[in-house]
Amino acid sequence: MNIRIIVHLRSSKSDQEFKPLLSGKFVLEKFPGKGGWTYARLPWVSPDRSQPFGWRIVSGSIDEHPLVHYKLMPMGDGSLFLPVKASIRKKIQKEAGDWVQVVLYEVEPPHSLCAELMECLAMFPGSKEMFESLPEAEQKGMVMKVFYAANEDEKAALISGLIDKLLTLREDSGK
């Protein structure tokens, strides 16, 4: 079943809820070898199980240089690191071995997005109930996918695909 819907999802910075994740000084390190990334190790930040590879999406700053919707990457030992691109290192005038001040906030989808998504699901009998029956991590992953859509058309297409998937799951489960 392919459902076409047109959705207008509002968002504003006032809707945005940020949770403080960390603030502190960290030493810049570099992975060995040619082309090795420069990064700040964040040992006490845990991966987000609802995101691919456990990425955690954050906004904040490094030495007061803004970071917007930045991905913390997995180290392989269960912790995450903040990759620091050459362009940022140049602006903050820091390299491997230097200390940097990092302030990060976890990015959450705006409450209005969640409410509007639920309104869309409610238009198709069974889709909202199926969504609510999914594990919380899977629900969050679906909402975050919509949140990070590049534009309104992509959001509408993602929501349409989500409804298709939920209704197919409902049919397959016999509910």
Image (cartoon, grey):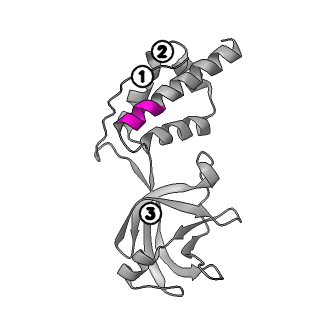
Give amino acid for label 3: Leu
Name the element at disc 2: loop
- The quarter in which the C terminus is drawn is top right
Total tally of numbered discs in the picture: 3
Check whether the beta carbons of the residues at disc 2 and disc 3 lie within 8 A of each other: no
Q: Of the residues under marks 2 and 3, which one precedes in the sequence?
A: 3
User: Label 3 neighbourhood size at 10 Å, few (<14), some (14-19), many (20+)?
Assistant: many
Residue carrying label 2 = 124
Q: Is 25 placed above or below 144 here?
A: below
Check whether the beta carbons of the residues at disc 2 and disc 1 lie within 8 A of each other: yes
Residue carrying label 1 = 120
Query: Picture coordinates of residue 33 (x, y %)?
Result: 65, 82
Query: Picture coordinates of residue 148 (x, y %)?
Result: 44, 45
Give the residues in magenta. Answer: 153-158
User: Label 2 neighbourhood size at 10 Å, few (<14), some (14-19), many (20+)?
Assistant: some
Locate residue 111: give its quadrant.
top left
Name the element at disc 1: helix
Q: Separation of disc 3 and disc 1 at Cα?
A: 32 Å
